[in-house]
Amino acid sequence: MAGAKFRGDYTLEKVYLIKDLARMSGQTVYTLKYYLNIGLIKEVGRSPETSFRYFDDSTIERLKKIRELRRENKSIAEIKELLEFSTPRQRTVGGSLEQ
């Protein structure tokens, strides 16, 4: 796990790298990068120094939903449509929200 960070409201939250997501979700890094490219999941932040993508617990929950929908034989297009409105806004490492 990448560790924890402080948001603008000073609450502690866990952040994960893509390799952590792969391990926790049972998906491959390749699959997760595909999901990123097509917009099924989004990073919640990115390090300006390293360009590492950061994810949080909401991404893990979203991956669980995606896996459940795939087990129901939903297509990627159907899943994307179903999840379209539940994407969190992106957060920079400094804590500010991007629109």
Image: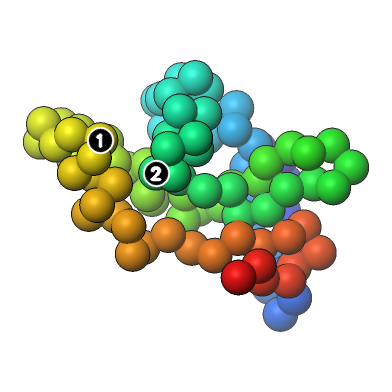
Q: Which residue is mark 1?
A: 76
- Label whose residue precedes the other's in the sequence (2 or 1): 2
Q: How is the image coloured?
A: rainbow
Q: Residue type at mark 1: give it.
A: Ile
Left or right: where does residue 81 sit relative to residue 34? left
Instruction: Report whether residue 56 is seen.
Output: yes
Residue plotted at (36% across, 63% down): 86
Residue plotted at (60% across, 60% down): 90
How many C-alpha atoms fall within 10 Å of the one at disc 2: few (<14), some, or many (≥20)? many
Could you give the CA–CA distance between mark 2 and mark 1, rounded to whole angstroms?
9 Å
Q: Which residue reaches farthest right?
A: 49
Residue plotted at (85% across, 47% down): 48
Q: Which residue reaches farthest bottom?
A: 9
**Looking at the picture, does residue 24 appear above or below residue 65?**
above
On the image, the x and y values in percent for residue 82 come to: 22, 54
Dots 2 and 1: beta carbons under 8 Å? yes
Q: Which residue reaches farthest left?
A: 72
Left or right: where does residue 85 sit relative to residue 96? left
On the image, the x and y values in percent for residue 24 come to: 47, 33
Left or right: where does residue 16 sit relative to residue 57? right
Q: Residue type at mark 2: give it.
A: Leu
Q: Which mark is residue 4?
A: none
Q: Which residue is mark 2?
A: 40
On the image, the x and y values in percent for residue 36 come to: 50, 38
